[in-house]
Image: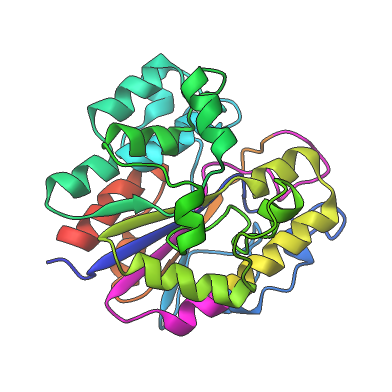
């Protein structure tokens, strides 16, 4: 039997469970009262699988039995297909999907499955015009998540959706559209208001996904203080989201590989990644979760039984 009416997946690119090291790991320093309370403690290597009254925290294997550092394209494809994509193609691969990974995503993915079952699905990120120009010109490839959306026949949202409050920017608040992209009149939200908007948008769909790449960029480039800042902003977003969340929905927070938890290196890590499951049925979801390829089956079970 299904146990949720709608599910929001919040994808944080490149976050793993690292050491309790205040010089290298932003998770060891950041003030995250909402997220730490839900997880039963700080998001560090020693945080075990834990289940509370309203959430479960699961250290999740991104390595999938394949040697080497996990990468974005294969990790995201594993999350969205339920298949061990690194094993199928013989390596961890990324950042963008190669033809073999694109073929796997075209064959089937979570967005396609939800639609095939009569549900609704959306990616809740807004992309600026230059993103679409680069994709259409062939100068840029879609990420594996974006490719899955495309293969399901769903649109990626743009500037108009951002202005209408139907999608959010990768930094949640929209500040980057003004400071980095030069807009002067696009919406800017407080983190709490962004969280409330995300809750309201997720209720419109059976399955929705919000993705940020900022965490992975910080993992590669730093600086450390930006890592702390983005985590504290996300914690405030989650505070706002939970204020407006309802008991009929499930929230899953996850990642594809480690990176930002060790800013002493610019490389991905082989650490487990955190998965936080919030809402009714979180125990059942968490009990079936071991690695990235378990996420699609767990999500479909939550939605359809």
Q: Is residue 191 above or below residue 292?
A: below
Q: Is residue 77 magenta?
A: no
Of 288 and 107, nearer the camera is 107
Look at 64% across and 61% down and name the residue there. Answer: 46
Of 139 and 236, nearer the camera is 139
Magenta-drawn segment: 238-267
Look at 66% across and 48% down and name the residue there. Answer: 214
Instruction: Tell me residue 44's x, y (percent).
Output: 66, 60
Look at 66% across and 38% down and name the residue there. Answer: 269
Quarter of the rendering occupied by the C terminus: bottom left
Look at 65% across and 79% down and name the residue there. Answer: 33
Q: Is residue 267 left or right of residue 80?
A: right
Q: Is residue 223 above or below residue 147?
A: below
Question: Quick check: can you spot residue 156?
Answer: yes
Q: Is residue 266 magenta?
A: yes
Instruction: Tell me residue 15's x, y (percent).
Output: 62, 50
């Amino acid at each position: 039997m299904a146990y949720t009416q709608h599910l929001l997946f919040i994808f944080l690119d490149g976050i793993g469970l690292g050491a309790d090291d205040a010089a290298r790991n932003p998770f060891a320093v950041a003030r995250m009262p909402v997220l730490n309370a839900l997880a039963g403690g700080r998001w560090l290597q020693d945080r075990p699988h834990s289940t509370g009254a309203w959430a479960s925290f699961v250290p999740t294997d991104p390595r999938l039995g394949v040697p080497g550092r996990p990468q974005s394209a294969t990790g995201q494809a594993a999350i969205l297909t339920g298949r061990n994509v690194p094993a199928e193609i013989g390596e961890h691969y990324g950042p963008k999907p190669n033809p073999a990974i694109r073929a796997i995503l075209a064959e089937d993915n979570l967005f396609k499955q939800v639609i095939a079952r009569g549900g609704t699905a959306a990616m809740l990120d807004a992309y600026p015009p230059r993103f679409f120009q680069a994709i259409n010109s062939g100068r840029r490839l879609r990420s594996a998540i974006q490719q899955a959306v495309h293969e399901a026949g769903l649109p990626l949202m743009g500037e108009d959706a951002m202005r209408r409050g139907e999608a959010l920017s990768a930094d949640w608040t929209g500040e980057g559209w003004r400071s980095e992209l030069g807009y002067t009149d696009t919406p800017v939200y407080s983190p709490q208001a962004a969280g409330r908007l995300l809750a309201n948008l997720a209720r419109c769909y059976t399955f929705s996904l919000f993705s940020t790449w900022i965490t992975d960029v910080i993992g590669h480039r730093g600086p450390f203080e930006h890592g702390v800042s983005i985590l504290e902003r996300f914690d405030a977003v989650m505070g706002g989201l939970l204020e407006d969340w309802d008991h009929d929905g499930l929230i899953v927070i996850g990642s594809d590989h480690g990176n930002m938890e060790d800013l002493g290196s610019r490389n991905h890590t082989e650490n487990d990644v955190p998965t936080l499951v919030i809402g009714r049925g979180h125990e059942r979801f968490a009990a079936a979760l071991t690695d990235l390829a378990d996420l699609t089956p767990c999500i479909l079970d939550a939605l359809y039984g």
